[in-house]
Structure formats: C-alpha cells, structure tokens
Image (cartoon, rainbow, N blue to C red):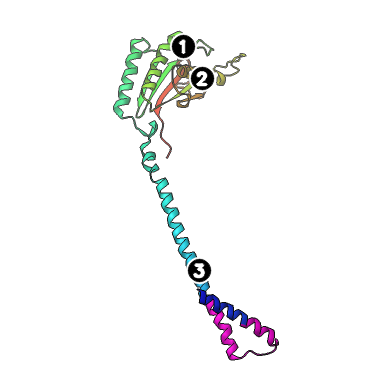
Amino acid sequence: MPSNHVQTSAAFEKLVHRNAVLPRSAKPSSSNQNDTDSWMITLSDLTLLLLGFAVLWYATASSTVQQSTAAVVRPARPQARAILTAAEVSMPPQTWQAVHKDLAQFVEAAGLLQEVTIEAAPGEILLSMRDSVPFESGQADLRARALPVLEKVANVVLAHGEMAVAISGHTDNRRIANPAFPSNWELSTARASRVARYLIQRGLRPSRIAVQGYADHRPKKPNSTPTNRRANRRVEIRLFQEKSAG
C-alpha cells in the first residue's frame, strides 16, 4: 500500500505539472498518456478493494442479524402452540347427552315438566321456560320459582368452560304500552337481560352470554288462541359451544 500511495501521488503531480505547462490545445504525447493511465489503474485497484471489503462486511452483518432474529423468535413457537383456548377443545357428544339428561331430571324433580321444555341437538341444548315461570304478566322481575332452574343452568355452564349461553325473550302479539315497556321489544329484551344478570351474579363471565329480544316475531305457534299465545310467551336459554375463529 505505501508503494501504491507513492505511485498515486507521483501520478497526480505529473498530471498537475502537465496541465500547468501544456496549453489546452496541445495534444499530449504517448508517454504522458501512459503516465496518466498509471494512476487511473492504481485508483481502480483501490476502488475494487474497498468494494470487496464492503461486500464482505454486508454479508457478515446480514448473517449476524439473521442468527439474532432466529434466536429471539424460535423459543416462542412451542409456547404459542401449547396455549389452547377453551373454545378450541370440543365437547364430545357424550358430554352433551349427560348434560341434557341432568337438566331433564332436574326439571322433572322440580315439577316443571309442563312449563319448562328441554330440547337437544348436536352440540347444543335449548331450555325454554314459559313466561309464567320467571315473570309476572307484563313484568321483568324474576319470580322465586324460576331461581332453582336458573341456578341449575349456572352450575352446568360453570362446570363446562367450553359452553356459551344465548338468552332470548319472546312475547305474544298482544300490544303492551306502559312507562316501563313502550312495546314488546323492550319487554322481551328486558326479560332476557334480567335472566342474564342473574347468571352473571352466579359467577358466569359476561363474555360468555348473549342477550336477544325478539318481541312477537318468532312465535312457536300461531297467535290464534290463548293456549298458543301462552306458549309463545317464553324465555329461551340456549347452551352451545362457540366455534373458535380461524
């Protein structure tokens, strides 16, 4: 490198001297042309050397960054795969059958077979209470006779962390208009909300509960007779398992 530096300096001095002596119109001789080319060759060698050093430095730095990133990310993979939410664990059909049998036996023992019905489908259970069980006519305050049934439902859901609850209120088609409930929409929603609030008080997380009020728009039977209207006034509690997203 010292010799290259000397040659480069000498070449620059020759070039400066030549430009100072010769006029702009003068044509350089072949010997002067060779002297000029010599410093250009030396400078190109230096440029290639610097370029090679830069490539080597970039390759080394990239390898180090990739190794550091892999060291940080790799330990997190097993931990992420090991975490499963309750919704990702399916309840087997035998569990649903056992829950259905348990609820049916409880309702029968409570003497409520005529007012509380329980239907089962794959992966869900629907418990329907006529409105006379939990509420007085036109009211949304829970009656004492409904509390044992709701207590049972709460215990079942708490025992199965995979379960979610959907509560829906329904009315007949007779109009209601009072300061508390201007229409059947408010009445049906208030009744479902009151049942949900009781379940929350018994320990259920609000995130596991959905509340809906349908007024008279989802009747079980035509609202043509008093018996049918009585069947349509109800509160339904649906137990199911939410599907995990993704």
Q: Which residues are magenta?
A: 14-43
User: Which circle marks residue 132 in the picture?
Assistant: 1
Residue 223 in view, yes or no:
no
Q: Earlier in the sequence, mark 3 or mark 2?
A: 3
Q: Earlier in the sequence, mark 2 or mark 1?
A: 1
Vertical arrangement, residue 133 with respect to residue 27, above or below:
above
Few, some or many residues within 10 Å of mark 1 (<14, 14–19, 20+) = some
Disc 1 secondary structure class: loop
Mark 3: which amino acid? Answer: Leu
Vertical arrangement, residue 15 with respect to residue 224, above or below:
below
Q: Nearer the viewer, mark 3 or mark 1?
A: 3
Residue 131: x and y, percent?
47, 14
> Which residue is tagged 2?
193
Task: Please identify the residue farthest to the left as the structure is shown.
Answer: 94
Labels 3 and 2 touching (C-beta < 8 A): no
Q: Nearer the viewer, mark 2 or mark 1?
A: 2
Few, some or many residues within 10 Å of mark 2 (<14, 14–19, 20+) = many
State the image quarter where residue 128 is shown.
Answer: top left
> Which residue is tagged 3?
51
State the image quarter where residue 159 is shown.
Answer: top left
Mark 1: which amino acid? Answer: Ser
Query: Left of 104 or right of it: where is 169?
Result: right
Mark 2: which amino acid? Answer: Ser
- Compute the Cα span from label 2 to label 1: 17 Å
Q: Earlier in the sequence, mark 3 or mark 1?
A: 3
- Compute the Cα span from label 3 to label 1: 89 Å
Q: Nearer the viewer, mark 3 or mark 2?
A: 3
Which residue is at a point 57% across and 85% down the rendered structure image?
35
Which residue is at a point 47% across and 9% down the rendered structure image?
143
Residue 17: x and y, percent?
65, 83
Q: Quadrant of the C terminus?
A: top left
